[in-house]
Image (tube, helix red, strand yellow):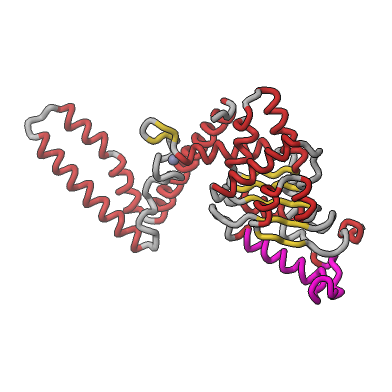
Amino acid sequence: MGYPSAYYEQAEQIMEQRRYENRREESRREKEVSDKIPEAGRLITGLAGTIDKLAKIILAHDDNAAKQIEKLKDENLADQDRLSALLKENGYPADYLDKIYTCEKCHDSGVLEDRRCECFHTVLRQIAAKELSKSIPIGLASFESFDIKYYSDVKSPALGGLSPRDIMEQNFRYCEKYAANFHIPCESIFMSGGTGLGKTHLSLAIAKTVIGKEYSVVYGSAPDLLGKIESAHFDRNDDENSEAMLTVKECDLLVLDDLGAEFPSQFYSACIYSIINTRLNYGRPTIVNSNLTYEELASRYTDRVASRLISMKNLKFAGSDIRIAKR
Ligand SMILES: [Zn+2]
């Protein structure tokens, strides 16, 4: 699969940074414990010198080297036990002075045997997703800045006796919970309803929360994302496997905003089906927003696309354009 080499370099830098920060945290903890418990400080220093003592014994080629090594080992174990006891007495967790690794599998080397560790691929996907979503004003929309008071509280028979505010309150709660409990696999969402009802706001808020949990998220409007996939396709002629297409298919969460706003074309239709279908098959969640109804989508794309959208959780947005109310 084809990520540019610059992404690999960036990923290596992130791994390097992780190792650096974990070492720094280990030293900080050692210092903290040593300052607080002087005896523990002496034990930590003593244990750190074990390797030097061992080397000295071996290099001396003494006849009773085996015995000396055995003795050193016993002392070392006794010191470790004493240190554990001191930690416990002072209210520290038993593993407080252990080595710290972000990835326990590869110990942050990014390599497992002769292949890349999964943690390295995760970092790569995050970089690719970030690059593809670069122009997104992710900082602007959050759950906190979503204001329900812009939605009318007049109940209407057309909304089953509810008001737009009632419905939007349900949608808000759903999205907030969805973001908080996000995992893979999880449900995909189809947000439908007219322009200016907050679909983009709530999906950006979800994206922001999910990014905060270290997942890779691609966010883009259908015209923008499909345009990028199309230009990669015609530039390199590598069909299904352009970097943009791979990133869109493989990221942890895809938010496809404003589906139906793109120029109608068979190429786009095929792309949309391929993206949504692949993601559903792999259990990777997608949030699709559209001003179009199911019927309009079915006639614009194919029944196959519409049937995939119907299989998602449908959130209907209600009310009138809140951008006007805000002004
Ligand atoms: Zn790893």
Q: Quadrant of residue 246?
A: top right
Reply yes or no: does residue 189 show up in magenta.
no
Residue ID at (70%, 49%): 303
Q: Position of residue 290 (x, y in %)?
A: 77, 51
Q: Position of residue 175 (x, y in %)?
A: 67, 61
Q: Does 15 sit above or below residue 255? A: above
Q: Does 132 sit above or below residue 326? A: above
Q: Quadrant of the C terminus?
A: bottom right
Question: Observer-nearest residue: 10 or 289?
Answer: 289
Q: Quadrant of the N terminus?
A: top right
Stretch of the chain drawn in magenta: 149-178
Residue ID at (75%, 55%): 294
Ligand 1: quadrant of the figure: top left
Q: Does 114 sit above or below residue 151? A: above
Q: Position of residue 257 (x, y in %)?
A: 74, 47
Question: Observer-nearest residue: 204 or 238?
Answer: 238
**Is residue 163 left or right of 245 when viewed as pictured?**
right
Residue ID at (75%, 43%): 221
Residue ID at (90%, 61%): 325
Reply yes or no: does residue 163 show up in magenta.
yes
